[in-house]
Image: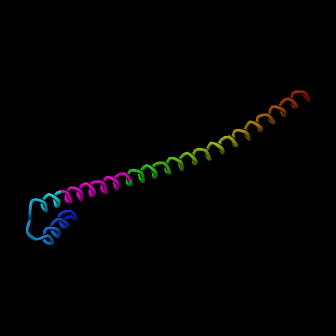
């Protein structure tokens, strides 16, 4: 039994014999409780969706940072290789002149 049904039964027991006014008020209370339950469920779904999106965002940010780190390392390696190539060219020119 959910909150809405339990609330309705307690309300009916408390009020005693049903009259059209009591029935109308009880029905209105039940409808209000159902809407409140539905709103709570919707809010829970929205919270779960936000949490899921936040998790996806954190995962994407972590992956992006890892890729940036890899790129930085590759840029460093490329710079070192270019320096080495330049040094080899200079050495090669020096050997060509001494022959």
Kindly indicate the quadrant of the structure image that contains residue 15.
bottom left
State whether residue 85 is above or below residue 30: above
Q: Main secondary structure of the magenta part?
A: helix
Q: Nearer the viewer, residue 6 or 88?
A: 6
Residue 78 image offset from top left, x and y in percent:
69, 38
Q: Residue shown at 9%/59% (left/top)?
A: 20
Q: Nearer the viewer, residue 77 or 55?
A: 55
Horizontal side of 19 relative to 25 (left or right) equals left
Q: Quadrant of the N terminus?
A: bottom left
State whether residue 69 is above or below residue 33: above
Kindly indicate the quadrant of the structure image that contains residue 87.
top right
Q: Residue shown at 8%/63% (left/top)?
A: 19
State whether residue 7 is above or below residue 24: below
Residue 41 image offset from top left, x and y in percent:
30, 55
Q: Residue shown at 24%/56% (left/top)?
A: 32
Residue 50 among those drawn in magenta: no
Residue 18 image offset from top left, x and y in percent:
8, 65
What range of the chain is rendered magenta? 28-46
Residue 65 image offset from top left, x and y in percent:
58, 48
Horizontal side of 16 relative to 84 (left or right) equals left
Q: Quadrant of the C terminus?
A: top right
Residue 33 among those drawn in magenta: yes
Kindly indicate the quadrant of the structure image that contains residue 82.
top right
State whether residue 25 is above or below residue 59: below
Horizontal side of 50 relative to 98 (left or right) equals left
């Amino acid at each position: 039994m959910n909150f809405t049904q339990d609330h309705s039964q307690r309300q009916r027991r408390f009020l005693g014999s049903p009259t059209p006014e009591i029935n109308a008020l009880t029905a209105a209370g039940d409808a209000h409780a159902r809407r409140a339950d539905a709103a709570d469920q919707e809010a829970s779904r929205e919270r779960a969706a936000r949490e899921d999106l936040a998790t996806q965002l954190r995962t994407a940010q972590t992956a992006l940072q890892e890729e940036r780190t890899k790129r930085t390392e590759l840029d460093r390696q490329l710079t070192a290789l270019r320096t080495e190539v330049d040094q080899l060219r200079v050495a090669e020119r020096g050997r060509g002149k001494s022959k």
